[in-house]
Image (cartoon, rainbow, N blue to C red):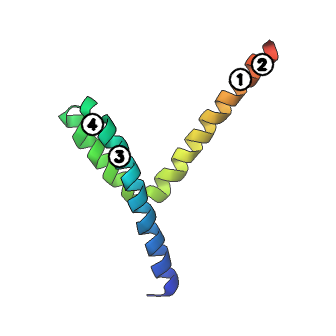
Amino acid sequence: MSLLQVGLASVYLLLGVTFFQNWYDAFKRDQPNLDEEDIFISRIVLGVATVLWPVVVPISYIKVLQATRREKRKEFQRISYN
């Protein structure tokens, strides 16, 4: 295995663990409000999202950017009409 492959695998695993910790903390905060089926589904989604974080994170970032742009547009329109 080349040094590049080891480096990429290390980055993938390190970021995967980091995302898992953040998402698991959010899951634990919401867990008291969930029933058994929702907890089961949330755990499956947590596992899939952790494995597929290179896909999940950019999609989430795009959604956040879109929401931010919408809010800025609304704020600009509100200011313009006043």
**Cα distance, mark 3 to mark 1?**
32 Å
Q: Nearer the viewer, mark 3 or mark 1?
A: 3
Q: Which mark is residue 75?
A: 1
CA neighbours of label 1 inside 10 A, class few (<14), some (14 to 19), many (20+) = few
Residue type of the residue flagged with mark 4 = Gln
Which is more N-terminal, label 1 or label 3? 3
Q: Which residue is mark 2?
A: 79
Q: Circles 3 and 1: CB distance less than 8 Å?
A: no
**Cα distance, mark 4 to mark 2?**
40 Å
Q: Which residue is mark 4?
A: 31
Q: Position of residue 32 (x, y in %)?
A: 25, 32
Which is more N-terminal, label 2 or label 4? 4
Residue 54 against residue 42 in the figure, above or below:
below
Q: Circles 1 and 4: CB distance less than 8 Å?
A: no
Residue type of the residue flagged with mark 2 = Ile
> SS at mark 3?
helix
Residue type of the residue flagged with mark 3 = Asp
**Cα distance, mark 1 to mark 2?**
6 Å
